[in-house]
Image (cartoon, coloured by chain):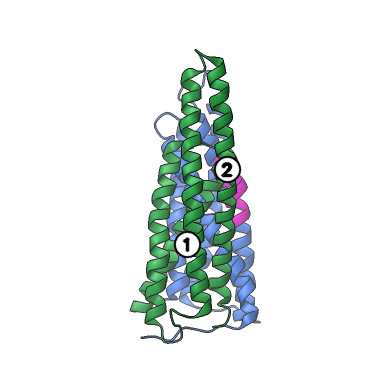
């Protein structure tokens, strides 16, 4: 395999990991789970996929004669990547807070129902905010994929 | 330095469907496998249900999108003939075999979830959940191998 093949494959592999993160976070947005272990694994996947896509992507842009790092579609992709990273960070923070509040719920439910209800409301509100960030990240990733395939202006 | 391959604009949308579908498929399979593997020890019903939903509602539709996109892009790239190239000879059996594993995993999780949600579940359905997790894991790895073949197009 040539260096180009390796770079392209690793870039693609990282993109698969990044999209897997979005899929896993969607399970939180659908309310299918609040499991902290799943959340942690999704965060690890983003660390690998997010860094891999940007790192190998920039490497490819420098390696290939046809593209320059200053090309409009590459700059657009970098901006979309940054948007996806930030919205993802906010979504993760929201789901982590909601998971903690849900844990508190279970602990206090037997003792003080007023505290449990307040905690449950806070958990629902936090999860709802996280949902918004999650769907914004999904849109950013979809736009990123469209830019990668169509390469507008290339 | 290397030259990038420029493809005709008409190929972009089918390719977007194929690649987007494949990425969603692998992500959904990974979620399904992760949920089933996390429930490996005690068959936690919530995780088995998460795995079932990931495979049925996310992975299966993604598989269809990926497969339709694949046929469409091949019909554009090789109009009127069936190509005999290594990367496609790898891609087809992996795509179809992975689809079969996905279907079996969905059936196993469906049965496992029925058994795990019973009050007296005990160890009932535990092996089915584990089997589904193993199949989803194998399919995930197989699709990553296919993505290597699609990206590098070995001769």
Considering the whole magenta stretch, tell me its main secondary structure: helix
How far is disc 2 from disc 1 in space, using C-alphas? 19 Å
Q: Quadrant of residue B75?
A: bottom right
Closer-to-camera residue (B108/B117): B117
Of mark 2 and mark 1, the one earlier in the sequence is: 1
Closer-to-camera residue (A144/B91): A144
Q: Within 10 angstroms of label 1, few (less than 14), some, or many (20 or more) residues?
A: some
Q: Residue at x 46, y 65 (%)?
A: B146
Give the residue number, with chain letter if any, for mark 1. A82
Q: Position of residue B127 (x, y in %)?
A: 45, 34
Q: Quadrant of residue B67?
A: bottom right
In the displayed structure, A39 sits above or below A148; it is: above
Closer-to-camera residue (A102/B107): A102
Look at chain B in the picture and name its colour.
blue
Q: Position of residue B77 (x, y in %)?
A: 59, 80
Q: Secondary structure at mark 2?
A: helix
Q: Residue at x 46, y 27 (%)?
A: A103
Q: Within 10 angstroms of label 2, few (less than 14), some, or many (20 or more) residues?
A: some
Q: Chain of mark 1?
A: A
Q: Which range is magenta?
A: B52-62
Q: Are marks 2 and 1 on the same chain?
A: yes
**Is residue B143 in sight in this rendering?**
no
């Amino acid at each position: 395999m040539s260096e180009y093949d390796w770079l392209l494959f690793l870039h693609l592999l990282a993109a698969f990991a990044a999209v897997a993160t979005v899929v896993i976070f969607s399970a939180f947005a659908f309310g299918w789970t609040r499991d902290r272990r799943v959340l942690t694994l999704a965060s690890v996947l983003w660390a690998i996929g997010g860094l891999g896509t940007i790192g190998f992507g920039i490497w490819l842009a420098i390696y290939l004669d046809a593209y320059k790092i200053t090309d409009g579609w590459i700059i657009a992709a970098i901006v979309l990547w940054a948007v996806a990273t930030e919205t993802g960070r906010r979504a993760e923070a929201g789901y982590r807070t909601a998971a903690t509040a849900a844990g508190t719920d279970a602990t206090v439910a037997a003792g003080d129902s007023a505290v449990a209800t307040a905690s449950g409301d806070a958990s629902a509100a936090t999860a709802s905010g996280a949902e918004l960030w999650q769907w914004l990240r999904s849109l950013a990733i979809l736009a990123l994929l469209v830019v990668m395939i169509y390469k507008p202006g290339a | 330095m290397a030259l990038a391959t420029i493809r005709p604009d008409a190929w972009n949308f089918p390719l977007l469907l194929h690649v987007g579908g494949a990425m969603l498929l692998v992500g959904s399979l990974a979620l399904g496998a992760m949920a089933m593997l996390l429930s490996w020890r005690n068959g936690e019903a919530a995780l088995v249900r998460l795995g079932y939903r990931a495979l049925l509602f996310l992975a299966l539709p993604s598989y269809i999108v990926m497969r339709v996109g694949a046929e469409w892009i091949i019909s554009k790239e090789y109009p009127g003939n069936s190509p005999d190239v290594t990367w496609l000879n790898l891609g087809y059996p992996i795509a179809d075999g992975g689809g079969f594993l996905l279907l079996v995993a969905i059936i196993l999780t469906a049965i496992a979830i029925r058994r795990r949600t019973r009050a007296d579940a005990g160890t009932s359905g535990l092996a089915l959940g584990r089997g589904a997790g193993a199949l989803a894991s194998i399919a995930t790895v197989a699709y990553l191998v296919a993505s290597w073949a699609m990206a590098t197009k070995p001769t």
